[in-house]
Amino acid sequence: MPTSSWVDRGDSKRGSGSSQSTQPDSSDGYSPHTSSPITPYGSSDSSLANGTHGRYDKVVTQASEQLNTMPVNVKVKVHFHEDIFVIAVSRVVEYEELVERVGKKIRLCGPRRDDGPLRVKYKDEDGDLVSLGSTEDVQMAFESMRPGHQVTLYVQ
């Protein structure tokens, strides 16, 4: 007798390892016209024809929209005197945290000593150097970034 993890509970459910037939049975409510859920491993043509595909597209679209609203890291190129450093920060970083991260990178990798506050600027669309002084300024700098590029900051 073959071993199986299926236990007959009288409710006509199949367990894993079961060799029970999947043919229509009047007692289990099976209908050849009911759609089965789509799995990441594929599905039958009949489930796609019965409207399940539309629900799948809706779920994929919703997941894609959630990914687009999630904060992602932004590559920030920092120019300080003759040196150029790169850091990654959240797209929704606060001004104080950005300046702290820039200062830490310069202290660790560059010639800077603690001799006063950093003055951080970015180039806007017109090519003008604009000083950062608030989180709103940081967000303006990030919004001016072209997709697939980094934000460039100039530190004095």
Image (tube, helix red, strand yellow):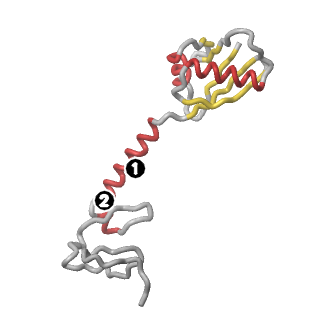
Instruction: Identify the mark nearer the N-term, 1 or 2.
Output: 2
Question: Residue 106, how many percent across, how many down?
Answer: 73, 22
Residue beneath the point at 43% across and 87% down: 2
Question: Residue 97, how many percent across, how many down?
Answer: 59, 22
Residue beneath the point at 76% across and 25% down: 108
**Crowd rating for badge 2 (residues with CA inside 10 Å; few <14, some 14–19, many 20+):** some
| In front of the other: 9 or 126 | 9
Judged from this view, the residue extending furthest toward the top is 116
Q: Say which amino acid is labelled 2.
A: Thr
| Residue 44 against residue 139 in the figure, above or below | below
Callout 1 touching callout 2 (CB < 8 Å): no
Question: Residue 135, how many percent across, how many down?
Answer: 52, 18
For this view, does 33 lie left or right of residue 39? left
- Secondary structure under tag 2 reads helix
User: Which quadrant would the C terminus be assigned to in this image?
Assistant: top right
Question: Residue 25, how many percent across, how many down?
Answer: 23, 79
Q: Say which amino acid is labelled 1.
A: Val
Q: Which residue is mark 2?
A: 52
- Secondary structure under tag 1 reads helix
| Residue 45 against residue 88 in the figure, above or below | below
| Residue 126 against residue 91 in the figure, above or below | above
| Residue 152 against residue 13 in the figure, above or below | above
For this view, does 30 lie left or right of residue 16? left
The quadrant where residue 151 appears? top right
Q: How many marks?
A: 2
Residue beneath the point at 58% across and 14% down: 132
Q: Which residue is mark 1?
A: 60
The quadrant where residue 117 appears? top right
Residue beneath the point at 28% across and 76% down: 9
| In front of the other: 12 or 99 | 12
| In front of the other: 9 or 119 | 9
